[in-house]
Image (spheres, rainbow, N blue to C red):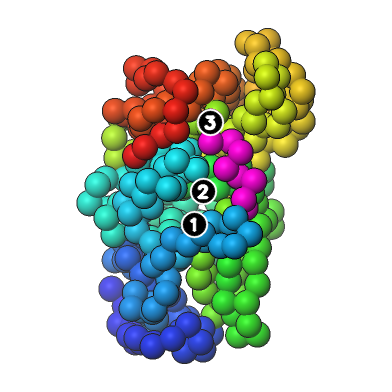
């Protein structure tokens, strides 16, 4: 591992100033960053340790109904928070389906948002990768591509974003609060991650020194709590990243869908919001035929980036299943296998309690 400076700031302002120097990176739990450093994928000149900054480990309910989740809130604490589980059940299900219990105990909210791709060519420093070395090429093109992107990819990068947590965040119109040298700003999560285009090395809108301090959920996101699910297809039951995932929320009025939210995971280099499918569902009856049309619309732009055409059909079927389960009602308890489309279906009608 490359030698680096270690900096422990006492305030957000000190952290931002320290991280603005070239080659600096923030350190929280380090569950992704330290692995990248050990493998030589990332080689920072300085680590700015933010784990002791005050006030970043809180879950707060603001006066306008917004829920504010601090950057250092642990994934396990968030998933098992009874208020979060009641108001945003898909978040709890997504978090509990990710990683292992040990990792969830240390992994943080901001770290989850900033996860790097799990593309094997990105992690292999002997392979050409435009994300690691701009202009080097993308060795994934023509390589092993079963898990790669089917939406939003370019000739320069076909990787995917691996987060479970970010998928329901995108569906619920979450925003990211950022401290930066000029003060603070808020960015919708849907706009926070970049698609690869010609510059796959630019993964987010963050600039040097920018620090995520919180993720916020708007008050109206609670309106989907009664009909909300997160589903994840993976190659083994636990401790595996998604092949494809889907977060769905429905706001019902009588026997009609008043409003729908759909986001897909592991299909692009960012969580993918399926807005055309949402528009199609508004005002419709929750029938298998309606859900099939919505799934078709959600994947209308999908194209294989290699040997992964199966992911398109898999994603369509997952959207249908997620919509079907959401329409039936959020289960009273998180399933024994969180987010698994094969888990036995619990009774519907009450909010999730993690």
Residue 113 has which mark? 1
Closest to the observer, 245 or 146: 245
Helix, strand or loop at label 2? It is helix
In this view, 345 is above or below 245: above
Q: Are marks 1 and 3 in contact (CB under 8 Å)?
A: no
Q: Residue at x 51, y 23 (%)?
A: 329
Q: How many marks?
A: 3
Mark 2 touches mark 3? (CB < 8 Å): no
- Asked if the residue at tag 1 contacts the one at tag 2, i.e. Cβ–Cβ closer than 8 Å, the answer is yes
Of residues 303 and 19, which is closer to you in this image? 19
Q: Residue at x 36, y 37 (%)?
A: 353
135 and 149: which one is in front? Answer: 149
Percent x, y for residue 165? 46, 47
x then y, percent, for residue 311: 54, 27
Residue 73, x across and y down, in percent: 38, 62
Residue under numbered circle 2: 166
Nearer-N-terminus badge (2/3): 2
Magenta-drawn stretch, dominant element (helix, strand or loop): helix
Q: Quadrant of the N terminus?
A: bottom left
Q: Which residue is mark 3?
A: 226
């Amino acid at each position: 591992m490359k030698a680096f400076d270690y900096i422990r700031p006492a305030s957000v302002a000190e952290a931002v100033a320290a991280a603005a120097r070239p080659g600096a990176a923030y350190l929280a739990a380090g569950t992704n960053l330290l692995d990248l450093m050990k493998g030589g994928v990332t080689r920072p000149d300085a680590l700015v340790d933010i784990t002791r900054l005050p006030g970043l480990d809180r879950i707060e309910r603001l006066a306008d109904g917004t829920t504010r989740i601090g950057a250092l809130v642990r994934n396990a604490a968030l998933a098992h928070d009874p208020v979060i589980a009641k108001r945003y059940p898909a978040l709890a299900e997504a978090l509990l389906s990710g990683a292992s219990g040990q990792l969830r105990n240390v992994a943080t909210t901001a770290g989850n948002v900033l996860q790097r791709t799990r593309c094997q060519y990105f992690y292999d420093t002997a392979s050409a990768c435009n994300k690691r070395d701009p202009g080097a090429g993308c060795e994934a093109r023509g390589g092993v591509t079963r898990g790669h992107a089917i939406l939003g990819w370019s000739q320069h990068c076909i990787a995917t974003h691996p987060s479970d947590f970010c998928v329901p965040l995108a569906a619920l119109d979450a925003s990211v609060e950022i401290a930066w040298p000029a003060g603070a700003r808020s960015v919708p999560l849907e706009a926070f991650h970049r698609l690869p285009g010609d510059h796959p090395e630019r993964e987010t809108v963050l600039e040097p020194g920018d620090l995520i301090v919180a993720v916020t959920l708007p008050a109206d996101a609670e309106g989907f709590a009664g009909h909300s699910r997160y589903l994840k297809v993976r190659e083994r039951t636990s401790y595996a990243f998604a092949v494809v995932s889907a977060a769905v929320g429905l706001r019902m009025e009588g026997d009609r869908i008043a409003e729908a939210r759909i986001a897909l995971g592991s299909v692009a280099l960012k969580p993918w919001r399926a807005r055309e499918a949402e528009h199609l569902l508004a005002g419709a009856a929750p029938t298998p035929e309606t859900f099939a049309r919505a799934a078709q619309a959600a994947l209308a732009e999908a194209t294989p980036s290699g040997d992964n055409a199966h992911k398109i059909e898999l994603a369509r079927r997952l959207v249908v299943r997620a919509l079907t389960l959401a329409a039936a009602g959020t289960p009273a308890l998180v399933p024994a296998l969180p987010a698994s489309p094969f888990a036995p279906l619990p009774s519907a009608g009450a909010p999730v309690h993690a």
